[in-house]
Amino acid sequence: MCGIQFILANTYDEASKEEAYVEFEEGMHSYLLTKEKDSTNDFGLLLNLDMYGETILYKDEIHEMIGICEGIIDIYSKEDKEQDIRRFARDLKSLCMEALQRKKHVFAIGD
C-alpha cells in the first residue's frame, strides 16, 4: 500500500533499519486533502509531504506536526473513516513527542 512511513531516527541508515513506524496511508491523505481543500486549518506540513520522497522533520517541524495532530484529533470524529484518521493522528503525535524526548528526528519516507 502506498503512503508515508514516519520513523524515529537520527540518520538515514538508522531510519532504514527501524521496524517501528506510523503509516500515513494514501487513502487517508486523499481524504484529508479533499476535506481540507477549502478549510482555514493549516495542515500543510502534513498534507504537502511528498508521497514518494523523503523528508526529515527537525525540532520546529516536529512541534508543528504535534499541533497538526491535535487539530486533526479535535476536528475528525464523525465518520468511520475519521476513526482511522484520529488513530493515525494520535500515533503520529505520540511518535513526535517521543522524538522530542529522545532528541531524535522524524523521517517521513514515501513509498
Image (tube, rainbow, N blue to C red):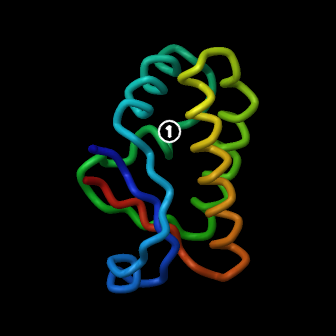
Q: Is residue 90 left or right of residue 13?
A: right
Q: Nearer the viewer, residue 94 or 103?
A: 94
Q: Quadrant of the N terminus?
A: top left
* Total numbered labels: 1
Q: Is residue 32 left or right of residue 55?
A: right
Q: Is residue 16 above or below residue 29?
A: below
Residue in the picture at 64% in, 82% down? 103
Q: Position of residue 82 (x, y in %)?
A: 59, 25
Residue in the picture at 49% in, 69% down? 20
Where is mark 1, residue-wise? Answer: 44
Q: Is residue 27 above or below residue 35?
A: below
Q: Nearer the viewer, residue 57 or 7?
A: 7
Q: Position of residue 34 (x, y in %)?
A: 43, 18
The residue under label 1 is which amino acid type? Gly
Q: Is residue 57 left or right of residue 13?
A: right
Q: Nearer the viewer, residue 106 or 18?
A: 18
Q: Position of residue 109 (x, y in %)?
A: 34, 60
Residue in the picture at 66% in, 24% down? 76
Q: Position of residue 27 (x, y in %)?
A: 37, 30
* Badge 1: residue crowd in 10 Å (few <14, some 14–19, many ≥20): few
Residue in the picture at 61% in, 15% down? 79
